[in-house]
Structures are given as C-alpha cells and as structure tokens.
Amino acid sequence: MSASVARLIAVPFALLAFALRVVTEFWVSPLALPLRPWPVSLAATVAAALAAVLIPLGGFWLCTRPAWRRPAAWGVDAGRRRFVADLTPRWAGPQAVLVGWLGGGMVPHERVPGTDRVRIADLGVATDIWIVLAVVTLVAGVALVLAGRPRLILDPHGVTLRALWTRRRFGWDELVPGGPPPQAKPNPRVITLYRCPPAGSPGPLLPWHLSADRLHVDPAFLALSLRRYLDHPEHRSAIGTAGELVALHDSSTSPMPAAPPRG
C-alpha cells in the first residue's frame, strides 16, 4: 500500500471520529449523567469520549498497518526529475482523526432543563457560526492530510521543504559537505545540516534542523541520500531517475567513499 492511498483512507476515519464525537456528546454522555456515584458517571463520560477517538485510530491502523513502516526509498517524480517524500501515514491518520474528533466537539450543545437529554444549544447566530466552524475544521483537516505536507523534495539543484505555510529551499552549494553526521539513534526525529555563511563572511556555520519524523522515508536513508549529493556533486544530475534510486540503495549497503577535498 502506498503512502498516498493510506492518507486517502484516513478521510473516512476522520469522518467517523467526527460522527462518534457528536453521538457521544448528544446521546452517550446523557446516559452517563444519572449514574451514581459521580465518579462512575465521570468515568463513563471520559471512556465514551476516548472511545470516539480510539476506535477510528484503531481502524485506521488495522487498514493501513503495512504503510506505517517508512521505506528506504524515495517517491520518483521522473517528469520533474526529483525525489519526493510526503507526510507519512503514521502521522496523517492520527492527525486526521484528531481533527475530526475536535471538530465534532465544536458542535454547540446544552442540557434540556429538567431532563437528561442534550440538544443543540440555542445561541442564536452563534449556533450557526459554531456549526460552520466545526464543518470547516473537519474539511480543513482532511484537506491538509491529502495535501501530504510537509513534503521534502530533492532535485539536481537543491533541497526544498514545503510545510503548511512555509517553503524553504537551499541549493546544494549552500550546504556544507560531509553532513548530516552519522546519527546516534536509528530513527532520529531531526537531521541537522549546516549552511555555508554568506560569501566573504567569517561567520559560523548556520544549522538547519530538518524534521524527519513526519516524512515517509527512512531517516537513515534520508541522511545517506543527503550526504551522497552533498559530497559527490557528480550524482546530482541523476536525481529523479529510477537508475539513481537503485544506486542509492546500492550505496546504502556499501561504504560510501569520502568526499573529495575542496580546493
């Protein structure tokens, strides 16, 4: 199962979380209110709210479990000559479910006086606003997951990280060869690269902390890919081809030669 298919599967589970949260607030929680003693009522209410998020999470995990393992591979965009790593399903699914669950909780409700029933709160125009906000939250959360952000792109000219609202790009020659350094942990959350200081400036190297835990690529393979293109510019022109992806796999199983000295 591909990462894009797994992210698509997150959509119905986000809708399920939204629906279960509404059912919990309007029908399940009122049944727990009369329970005595009060800790039992509280425990039942909390358990229902947790079930509304855990059931969709469990369902998503069961349906997409094979896609949660981050591969030692890139997505190949041969038309644009680039390697791509999008948002990993292990983040996309929980993110979509949580947004759906939060959206369901935004529907305004109130207890009917003298009963244990719950209804949509009568807040005038504010009621309509809150309902619209709940739907917008759900739609926005689903759209963000389908967009696959953050997205890391390697092309023959440099590295681009596209996040939700920002875009950062560095040319290969703007980054210091020899990095990122070997990671102490097998799955590091952050990979650190260093940017060269401005030309003619004696200033220190500037770190760029690349968050790797949300990308659908094995962090060690990501680090190896970056070192290959930083240390060996002759390989950059092949980025985005199937042959270069095979070469990357071959280099991951054999020691990589040291970078040539810079004159």
Image: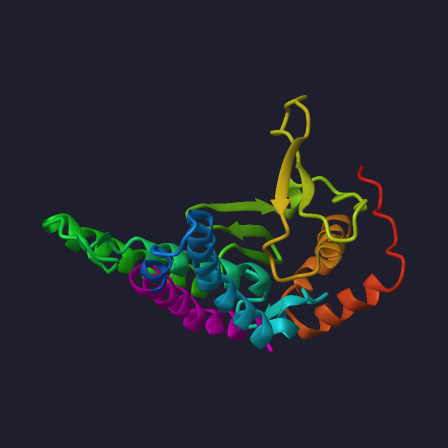
Side of 129 relative to 147 (left or right): left
Q: Is residue 235 visible?
A: yes
- Outermost residue, top direction? 202
Q: Nearer the viewer, residue 201 or 170?
A: 170
* Residue depicted at 31% across the width and 65% down the height: 27
Quadrant in the picture for the C terminus: top right
Q: Which residues are magenta?
A: 1-27
* Residue depicted at 38% across the width and 69% down the height: 15
Residue 7 at x, y percent in the picture: 50, 69
Side of 27 relative to 45 (left or right): left
Vertical arrangement, residue 9 with respect to residue 136, above or below = below
* Residue depicted at 74% across the width and 44% down the height: 180
Q: Nearer the viewer, residue 259 or 29?
A: 29
Q: Nearer the viewer, residue 33 or 50?
A: 33
* Residue depicted at 33% across the width and 66% down the height: 23
Coloring applied to the structure: rainbow
Vertical arrangement, residue 100 with respect to residue 63, above or below = above
